[in-house]
Image (spheres, grey):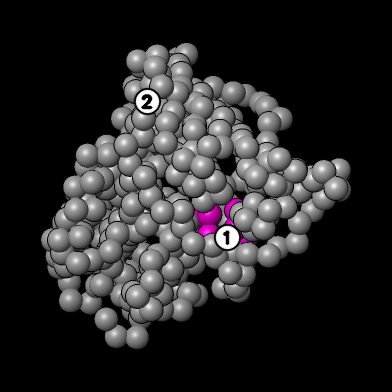
Amino acid sequence: MGDALRIGVIGAGNIIGQYLDTLPRLPGVRITAVADLDPARAAAVADAHDGVRATDPADLCTAEDVDLVLNLTVPAAHADVALAAIAGGKHVYTEKPLALTTGAAREVLDAAARAGVRVGCAPDTVLGTGTQTARRCVDDGRIGRPVAATAFLTSSGPERWHPSPEFFYRTGGGPLFDMGPYYLTALVTLLGPVARVSGMAATPRATRVVGSGPLQGTEVPVEVATHVTGLLEHESGALSTLVMSFDVWAAQLPRIEVYGTEGSVSVPDPNGFGGEVRLFTSVSPQWTDVAVSSGHRDAGRGIGVADLAGALVDGGTHRASGELAHHVLDVMESLLRAADSGRAEEVTSTCPRPAPVPLSSD
């Protein structure tokens, strides 16, 4: 692999800009190629970045100058692109979700195991100082034994600002599959894997109206639940309450809070890398700011790729792993099954709780 893990990116849509802002400044990784079904989009990225060539997806998956495929395609293509990359002998890092179903996700992980390559998956936001500093509070016992947590995503939906929001309302979309991975990955990072879930779901509106861009005024059919409420029982015994909604115009709920026998910790938005962590304890009964103590400073999307690259060098386990993403996907599927059946559902998968991230500067 040489001195740096060489990255080929498939998918030059909206999210690629955030990776391009981060990856060039991280050690141990280098972008060498980009591909997209629209060759013009790939060419535009290559033209703007020295040392990056434009190609097509099939070529990129077998290219000699690519060690890892960064899969930034739409969710429906995640598994197929990952399998093609693995067949080409490449490591894979995929935007969330890992696949549309746990069955497809397991196929990707099994193929990678046979090929001897690694699978990573977003979100890597939990590697930033926000979630990691909150985790440090939990791990150091500052709130006592964790008892419960809450996690709330309240939004009126992405169609007001996104110029092409159709995929948000198709299979693999909705607030649970779109934003749930951020919140659930944070909950697993804070409290460990989930053993059992119950839930309810609703779809109050059959269509949505695009609010901006060339499709403004167009109606989009809604094929998924847009308000999901769940109760999660972690293997540790802690209980988390989850609300993921595209049906709330305004709310004053926290993002994530963790409650223990001796206090509470307020966790910042898991869709970001930083943010303010606040602590309330029995010995200091007022909300106080917590100094940054863990995580990657000034991180951005792509830090998980660099973490995987570092693990390849030292032989360790990368944190934003495919197994973690598979478990989160299993939790989401189980929630929807519980909502449909009206019964609690066992989550059949598990995963290791990712290792904490020491405080570092990126």
The location of residue 35, given as percent across then percent down, is 25, 61
The location of residue 171, given as percent across then percent down, is 31, 30
Q: Is residue 350 visible?
A: yes
Q: CA distance from mark 1 to mark 2?
A: 32 Å
Q: Residue at x 23, y 66 (%)?
A: 117
**Magenta stretch containing residue 48, yes or no?**
no
Instruction: Read off the residue under disc 1.
Output: 128
Q: Nearer the viewer, residue 33 or 203?
A: 203
Q: Is residue 19 visible?
A: no
Locate residue 164: give its quadrant. top left
Q: Is residue 59 left or right of residue 296?
A: left
Q: Residue at x 51, y 24 (%)?
A: 229
Front disc: 1 or 2: 2
Sort mark 1 into few (<14), some (14-19) or many (20+) by Cα contacts within 10 Å.
many
**Magenta stretch containing residue 126, yes or no?**
yes
Locate residue 82: give its quadrant. bottom left
Q: Nearer the viewer, residue 130 or 94?
A: 130
- Identify the amino acid type marked 2: Glu
In the rendered structure, which segment of residues is drawn in magenta?
125-132
Q: Residue at x 59, y 64 (%)?
A: 295
Question: What is the quadrant of the N terminus in the image?
Answer: bottom left
The location of residue 187, given as percent across then percent down, is 53, 44
Instruction: Read off the residue under disc 2.
Output: 345
The mark that comes first in sequence, 1 or 2, is: 1
Q: Nearer the viewer, residue 37 or 121?
A: 121
- Identify the amino acid type marked 1: Gly
The location of residue 203, given as percent across then percent down, is 43, 16
